[in-house]
Amino acid sequence: MYLYYEFMNILTKLYKKGARGMILNEKYIDELIEYLRSGNLAEDFEYSTEERRYEILDFLEKLMELGEVADEAATKIIFKNTQLGAFFENSQK
């Protein structure tokens, strides 16, 4: 359950309300990237309890899932209304 709240916290930080609805919070994404690249996550993992290690691994799995979904969304947006977009759409059916 803790991981769910942490993931929701991340989503809250990723998005902030704007005049047109939800907009990305690039600063938080940059901070998350820096945290992953800096080695701090690896250090946190190394000195954590077993339970916390599983939470970190679950969190990383969710991030990878988010990356896959973002890739799919980007592909659909970029190739919308093109022959290649139609090919991608048909291949997923």
Image (cartoon, rainbow, N blue to C red):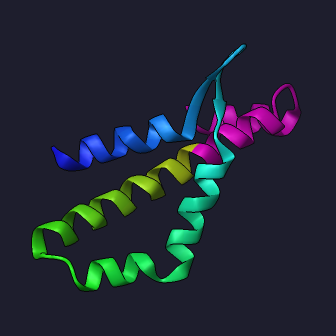
Image coordinates of residue 41 in percent, x first then y, are 40, 75
Q: Which quarter of the rendered picture does the N terminus lie within?
A: top left
Residue at image coords 77%, 33%: 77
The image shows residue 58, relative to residue 24, as above or below, that is: below
Q: Which quarter of the rendered picture does the C terminus lie within?
A: top right
Q: Is residue 49 magenta?
A: no
Residue at image coords 73%, 42%: 75
The extreme right residue here reads 82
The image shows residue 4, relative to residue 49, as above or below, that is: above
Image coordinates of residue 57 in percent, x first then y, are 29, 67
Image coordinates of residue 15 in percent, x first then y, are 57, 33
Q: Nearer the viewer, residue 18 or 84?
A: 18
Residue at image coords 85%, 25%: 81
Q: Nearer the viewer, residue 78 or 56?
A: 56
Main structural element of the magenta stretch: helix, strand or loop?
helix
Residue interval drawn in magenta? 70-93
Image coordinates of residue 2 in percent, x first then y, are 19, 48
Across the whole image, how many numbered discs are drawn on residues?
0
Q: Is residue 65 left or right of residue 89?
A: left
Q: Is residue 87 magenta?
A: yes
Q: Is residue 76 left or right of residue 65?
A: right
